[in-house]
Image (cartoon, rainbow, N blue to C red):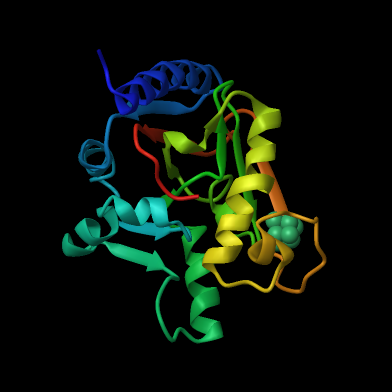
Amino acid sequence: MMDDQAYEQWLWEMTAQRCVQNLVKHGFDAHFLPDVASAAAAILKMVQSFDSFGFGGSSTTRRLGVLEALRAQGKTIHDHWQADLSKAADLDIRLAQGRCDCFFCSANAIAATGEIVNVDGIGNRTNAMTFGVGKVVIVAGMNKVTPDLDSALQRVRLVAAPMRAKSLNAKTPCAETGVCTDCNAPQRICRITTILHRKPLMTDISVFLIGQSLGF
Ligand code: SF4
């Protein structure tokens, strides 16, 4: 008999198979890997020919160790998660992310029916993942996969945004109570919602689903 975790793993694998099939139908390249280590190895192999990389504000992509591995290989990295960046330097990095060879980010939710949902406050991430970069790599734990588009949009509002706001110590209602009030707070983090219904025409996107719970 399997333990509870093994049943969860089984369900994730079944869901991931369906999600990968539907993402491929929608023009994305898509893969399921059981864990962070196997995903990192597959991704590093895939991106070895690129020279410059952008990293969106995502804890999931950092968990892979890909950023450090690429930096150790002498690649150019555009990463705005750095202490004491001036406003101008931060803006330059975000702009460069939209013109690099390969952009790494996560998703706020991925529908098993094959749509990818993201919410952004500034827009550098949602811009870079739709136009301007030749190759986009989206990495997401199976905790972010929902049954359909409606539940993906719901996940963003009920789960991803409040947790993200809390992690940023944002002065928003959700960071206080865990509940979204569709606020008008100056620090509101959800200002732009993108749904990739199909692969954007001029951007090559690979999606790596990982059989672990990762990020928000
Ligand atoms: S709209 Fe406001 S309250 Fe709702 S999740 Fe976004 S920041 Fe939080």
* Quarter residue 83 falls in: bottom left
Residue 63 on image: x %, y %: 31, 53
Residue at left offset 70%, top offset 72%? 187
Q: Is residue 49 left or right of residue 31?
A: left
Q: Residue at x 41, y 57 (%)?
A: 59
Quarter placement of the N terminus: top left
Residue 20: image x %, image y %? 45, 21
Total marks in image: 0
For this rendering, which residue is in front, 99 or 110? Answer: 110
Q: As rendered, which of 74 and 164 lies closer to the eye?
A: 164
- Residue at (43%, 86%) from the top-left corner? 84
Classify 147 as above or below 56.
Answer: above
Q: x and y percent of residue 77 in the render?
A: 33, 64
130 displayed left or right of 214 = right
Ligand 1, image quadrant it occupies: bottom right
Q: Is residue 16 visible?
A: yes
The residue lying furthest to the left in this view is: 73
Please tell me whether residue 19 is drawn above or below residue 77 in the rendered image.
Answer: above
Residue 210 locus on image (x, y percent)? 35, 34
Q: Nearer the viewer, residue 97 or 80?
A: 80
Identified at 54% across, 47% down, the residue is: 129
Furthest residue toward top: 1
Residue 196 can be seen in this image: no
